[in-house]
């Protein structure tokens, strides 16, 4: 199971409203032989009936409602000719859905503004996250005059300064970057 290029594990947190991609391959038990192509794969009321060479690839939308106790996706392999109607074993993953993204609730600058460099200039950013879990929020900051070590004017990922903000409560983070 993946979101884009990120492979997921049982118990991972995911953002609500995204699309999950379930991919896999089906073999007969203890063989490398694929069943005929006319069996069904069911995942959370979504199905795929054409399975060339035993491969499946289902894209399933995630609810935009938080499910903080977890949502279990069960992969059912059904209707294989000559085998039976339900041949599913323990093919499942439980994911925790957090439908609320962190939000910038205020700042001393307007998004996209150009600030003139000054050694005494401070910037404040308010970020709010509403969730029922331990919150770790990573804030990446890039200042052209300070962090642009090759003077190309572009913010590469290895040039950002990182601040890790952690709390166990619903909170609004407030930071001054100096």
Image (cartoon, helix red, strand yellow):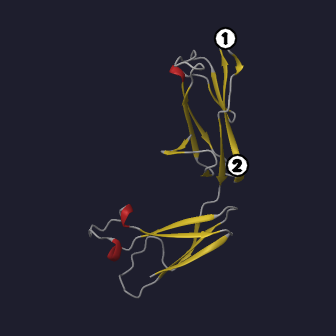
Q: Secondary structure at mark 2?
A: strand
> Mark 2 or mark 1, which has the lower sequence index?
2
Where residue 124 appears, as percent x and y from the top left, is 51, 79
- Check disc 2 and report the residue beneath it: 70
Q: Secondary structure at mark 1?
A: loop
Q: Quadrant location of the N terminus?
A: top right
Please rate how many residues cluster around mark 2, counting C-alpha atoms within 10 Å: few if below 14, some from 14 to 19, many from 20. Answer: some
Where residue 118 appears, as percent x and y from the top left, is 36, 85
Q: Residue at horizontal 67%, vertical 14%?
A: 83
Q: Is residue 129 left or right of residue 52?
A: right
Quadrant assignment, res 34? top right
- Check disc 1 and report the residue beneath it: 82
| The label number, if any, that marks residue 161 in the structure image | none
Residue that protrudes farthest toward the bottom in the picture: 120
- Given residues 115 and 149, the one toward you in this image is 149
Q: Is residue 29 left or right of residue 138?
A: right
């Amino acid at each position: 199971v993946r979101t884009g290029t990120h492979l997921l594990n049982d118990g991972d947190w995911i953002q609500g409203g995204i699309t999950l991609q379930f991919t896999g391959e089906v073999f007969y038990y203890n063989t490398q032989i694929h069943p005929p192509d006319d069996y069904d794969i069911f995942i959370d009321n979504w199905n795929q009936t054409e399975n060339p060479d035993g491969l499946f690839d289902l894209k399933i939308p995630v609810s935009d409602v938080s499910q903080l106790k977890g949502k279990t996706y069960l992969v059912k392999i059904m209707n294989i000719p000559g085998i039976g109607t339900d041949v599913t074993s323990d093919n499942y993953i439980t994911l925790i859905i957090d439908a609320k993204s962190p939000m910038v609730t205020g700042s001393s600058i307007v998004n996209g503004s150009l600030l003139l460099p000054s050694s005494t200039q401070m910037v404040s950013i308010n970020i709010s996250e509403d969730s029922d879990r331990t919150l770790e929020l990573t804030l990446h900051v890039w200042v052209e005059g300070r962090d642009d070590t090759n003077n190309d004017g572009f913010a590469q990922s290895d040039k950002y300064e990182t601040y890790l903000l952690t709390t166990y409560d619903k909170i609004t983070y407030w930071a001054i970057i100096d």
